[in-house]
Image: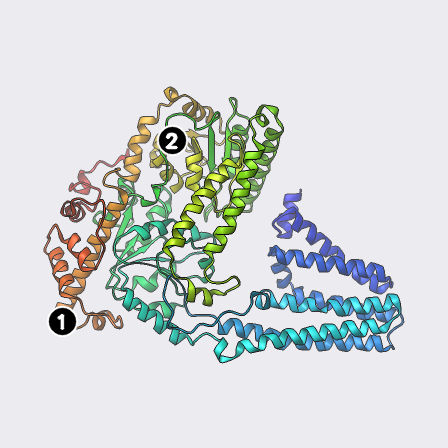
Amino acid sequence: MISKAIRLARVGSASELAAAVFLGLGYPCVMLGALLPNIWLFVAGAAVTYLTDWYLHQKDSYLVNRLNKVRLGLPIRFLLRQLLLVLLLAREGLAETALFYTAVAGFLVFYGIQAPHGALATLIRLRRTLPVVTRNVDLGGVRIPDAPPKALLHRSGEKMLHLDLPAMGGVLAAVVLDRPVIGYAGVAATLGLGLLYTAVLAPYLRRKRRVPPAATVLKAVSAWLLEYRPTTVLYFSGSNESAYQVNMWLETMERIDGRPLVIMRERELMPKLGTTAVPVICVPGGTHMMNLNLSTVRVALYPANVGKNIHILRVPTMKHVFIGHGDSDKLASVNPFSKAYDEVWTAGRAGRDRYALADVGVRDEDIVEVGRPQLAPIQGWSGTPKNAIPTVLYAPTWEGWDDHPGNTSLLLAGENIVRTLLAAEPPVRLIYKPHPFTGIRNKKAKAVHERIIAQVKTAAAARAADPRWSAHADPRAQAAARAEMVRIEAELDALAAPGRAGGDEAEESRVSLADPVKLERITTLRADWNAAYWRSVGWWEHRIVTGPEPKLYDCFNESDAMVSDISSVVSDFMASGKPYALTDSAALGAEEFQRQNTAARAAVILSNSATELDVLLASVTSPERDPLAGARRELKEYLLGPDHPTSLERFNTAIHVLAARAEARNLGVAQAIGEQPLGEVDRESDAPPVDEEAREAAEAVADGDAGAAGEIGDALEAPDRTGITDLAEADELGDSAELGDSAASPDEREMPLAR
């Protein structure tokens, strides 16, 4: 009942629901107090409305947005309360007194002050908004002044409205104590504070306090790009919930050869971007994006298929690659839009076969198998549970954009899975980590998610009270681990925030240069935090992990088995070699489900009743009862590619090969038009001339020279590639078989998916 009320009220928790109820009751009490009149009822109702309004705004409750939509926004609610105070004065027989007129005039003047205050705050924000937001980009040549103190602009309108408290309190006190002077003083204090707040903002509109014009900033960014000469770009656009899709590639971008660059399109995602040494430029405007000087870039990588990709796909001087943000049997992994890219890079041969069977127009020769460089942190399985009882991770994917029952196990099987694991004998420990998108489209999925959380919390509380488990607890060690987490979080916050506390995005763009020492410290602290997190809880304690920390791969390493759905999570978990189960939520039957989904071939297949979980648990506790161990090893290579050469080596080689082809194309175009600058043909401004070394390397690639990838890596001023012992062999692999397949034709290749 409470969860349904929470959904109907559009609030996020029971405390927000309680605040919404009190807010709804408070205003009628204020009105009744004014009409009766009953000053104490009025005071109580007003206090409740002030407090609940403040709480809901601090929580960023969605209810606040809904109230604005129905014309009951915060300014209206404050005005209503003030009008009711005037009514109370009239009902108390004070309508002809100086206090009455002072209150009316004071509130009118106060509202008049709010207009210039709001205009100033808005103008300051606009004047400090850069056309780009950057990280690790030297904008020292651009004069960007410090931001105003955060206290002045953060929720400035809300703070201004609350300055009516002295007037409200003074007038009410004047009525109760029959001392009008208190009311006059309160009104004067409100007006004085309002004028002072407005006056303090005014200096920040002066020229020296404003950031330079957009043209100046864009010119500085272009100058930096010409100096840095990026060679490989990771381009990303997405919703607020999709930051994980770009974050998963940051470490890989740090480790590739050449000069990497990350380009993003949404300002809101910048605070959610992980710490990185790679330069980052966020360009929200499409026009600014299309005029960005990327003439030195030869390879563009795309983790997501989104409309804004067109703003860089239009550039012909670079090669475009879809790398995705996961590898799975979902339809998204064979999106027909992939035809827009020059190449599609998949983890293993499974991705190649997937496109062949889907027949969406992606040619086999345009697919390159590069592995998954992000999977290095995943630890292999020892064959036995890590702790005294096995830990099972339940990581369902989200409900998707349609209502196909096979999208997620959450809706039809989720509660059965959780209930079975919580009641398992011998006992197991459950870690529940849902997809970040869970419930954003389907309210039923969100409701199931909330019920599962309640189930896990109840079971965790019962286990904590059970002497069988509490006897293993070490409260002192766990408390020390929690204290260490708090200390680490404080240090991470101080290290991760560029510049001084309270700086805005313009100031952060000015000062956010990579500090290798600081970045190394952040990496160490995050590892320490993760270790402390798992020490802070018992190995028997059920856990719910819904935030970004601990990361999914950390949960993989803590678990002995996993239950999930058809998604990239399964392919990634395959790197651990641990047993896993998949839910056939669409009720296809185990044989058909495995035929349609590659990742299911080495999985325990669950029905929606989840009765087959005992097979998974037996595989974990008794290796001799694990008949799928061999199948998992074979499927791992099919999905993720071989262990040698490493995924990073294959990824690097793929970049070098494609960069060489881009250079060869550009040289060919230049020669075809009589050595004219490429910019005239491709309509790219300020394209630099191609140096002779790069020209020779690119022509060698065009002529089929097997060693050209290494040469073009040098020509593009790439650092030496560690771990690649035979570049010529790697390049032959890239030219003849697209990094991960034999030279056999597609017709000669075995197609396991078609079995």
Residue of label 2: 578
Q: Quick one: label 2 or label 1, which is nearer the N terminus?
A: 2
Residue of label 1: 675
Q: Residues within 10 Å of mark 2 (few under 14, many from 20)?
A: many
Residue 157: x %, y % from top left: 62, 68
Amino acid at pointer 2: Lys
Which quadrant of the rendered structure holds the C terminus?
top left
Viewer-proximal residue among 395 and 163: 163
Q: Is residue 224 left or right of residue 523?
A: left
Residue 499: x %, y % from top left: 46, 62
Residue 402: x %, y % from top left: 46, 47
* Label 2 – label 1 distance at C-alpha: 58 Å
Q: Is residue 291 visible?
A: no
Q: Say whether marks 2 and 1 touch (CB < 8 Å).
A: no
Amino acid at pointer 1: Glu
Residue depicted at x 23% and y 54%: 719
